[in-house]
Image (tube, rainbow, N blue to C red):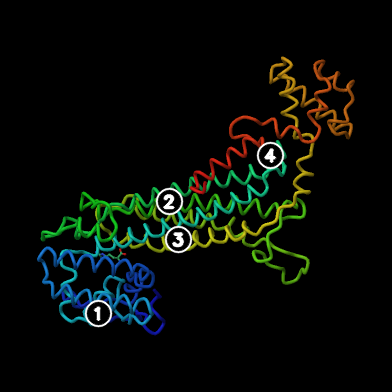
Amino acid sequence: MSPPGAAARPSAGPLHNAGISRFAEPQDTGFRRLNDSIGFDWRLSPYDVDQSIAHAAMLAAQGIISPADEAELRRGLEQVRAELTDGSFPFADGDEDIHMAIERRLTEIVGRVGGRLHTARSRNDQVATDVAMFVRAHAREAVERIGRLAGTVLEQAERHLDWPMPGYTHMQRAQPIYLSHHLLAYVWMLLRDRERFEAVVAATARMPLGAGALAGVNFDTDRRAVAAALGFSEVAANSVDAVSNRDFVLDYLGAAATCATHLSRLGAEIVLWSTEEYGFCEVSDAWASGSSIMPQKKNPDAAELLRAKAPRLVSNLVALHGVMHGLPLTYNKDMQEDKEPLFDSCDTLELCLEAATGMLDTITFRRDRLAAAAADQFLAATDIADLLVRRGVPFREAHGVVAGLVRHAIDEGKQLSELTPDELARQSPVLDDEFYALLRDGAWLETKVSEGGTSLARVREQLQQARAALRLA
Ligand code: ARG
């Protein structure tokens, strides 16, 4: 599908009033520019054509139109679909929105019978149905893309299973962890994102079509047949709700905002880790750019943009909440404002997921730099406190003892392992050789044996859980 081409794009002149003879005066050009949605809602066209074909088939099956008329409508709609697909669809001045454009073109192709298509249908239930189908398709796309990204991150976790690195709180080195453990945190975030998009798919299960303008229609329609043909599992039970509802758009925008927020945290970490100061990773050339003036530079632009896109998706969510809040039932033209935020969030999220997957697939981590940062002995402070706890000291007191040791070591310019037994004894009588053993070889990583912790056995267990959740196992 392609947008109305420049030549064919409606010029928004003061021509007509959609052929509606209630009006004596033409529409103002300013009104048309404000009111027309064809400039963006052309993207609903595949769903609108599918919907119309299913609707016409139902009208014929119910004896509301003749089989011959239905065949003509189908033929015309298939031609419309082909024209929309190959870009030859002639958009016309006066096409207010995609629904009017398709019906206008259909009537050009099949003649007067084209006017029968809109029997027992309003643009109010029509647009709600198109948008529900659009949301369903893009929520499924998000589920796919999130699965691919999570799979890529999981592979990186497997590749870097036992690479120590510092874990941070407040951006201060806190406790060492394995890189695999850190990366798996993103896998769980993405798994929750995927669940949210699965819930969005579920939120589109009830078909609005058949609600008419708001009260139902004056024909004995078969909504369930249309729903089945269009992949809806139910029909919306209340026609007033059906044409007023945009919850599924809000749900998509909410899921997209949260997912983009996760991607922004991933991007932010890659940006930091790519600096000379951290030196934990390097993005591949394919996902970086150079500087126009500084030849030495390799910028992690993709990661920066992942970091920056999130607020835009949040603002799309906020924008539609603004439109919908306080809006009296049922359809109001305000609701036309659902589309641009939705389309923008779909496009942005799908691109970000693809970029994150490409960048993460080709990133290189630097074991030496990660290990050097993880070897900072102050990261063992909690473990030393726990050693004192095992010797019978209450944790809060142990915390104070270790804080004293750390302060003393800093004052003396020493590593913790360089403190003498005498210096230890001054802080606590129960510190013995196990203190030194604990500081050797980063052994304290392997003491995090609690479920969900960083010891290798637990990370392996977690990898299995993540594989199963991703349906990879
Ligand atoms: N372009 C409109 C929209 O996006 C279609 C529905 C128009 N309905 C109406 N009663 N004017 O919301």
Mark with earlier residue (4, 3) = 4
Disc 4 marks which residue? 177
Disc 3 marks which residue? 346
Query: From the viewer's perspective, is the residue at label 1 or at label 4 nearer?
Result: 4
Circle 1 packing at 10 Å, graded few (<14), some (14-19), many (20+), is some
Ligand 1 closer than 8 Å to the CB at disc 1? Answer: no
The amino acid type found where label 4 is placed reads Ile
Question: Could you say where residue 412 lies in the image, as x and y percent from the top left?
Answer: 89, 31
Mark with earlier residue (1, 3) = 1
Mark with earlier residue (1, 4) = 1
Q: Residue furthest bottom?
A: 7
As measured in the structure, the alpha-carbon distance from the residue carrying label 1 to the one carrying label 2 is 42 Å
Question: Could you say where residue 196 lies in the image, as x and y percent from the top left?
Answer: 43, 47
Q: Which of these two is toward me, 362 or 220?
A: 362
- What residue lies at 71% left-to-right and 57% top-to-bottom? 282
Question: Could you say where residue 451 lies in the image, as x and y percent from the top left?
Answer: 59, 31
Mark with earlier residue (1, 2) = 1
Q: Is residue 355 left or right of residue 272?
A: left
Helix, strand or loop under label 4: strand
Which numbered circle lies on residue 197? Answer: 2
- What residue lies at 21% left-to-right and 79% top-to-bottom? 107
Residue 346 in view of the camera: yes
Circle 4 packing at 10 Å, graded few (<14), some (14-19), many (20+), is many
Ligand 1 closer than 8 Å to the CB at disc 4? Answer: no
The amino acid type found where label 2 is placed reads Phe
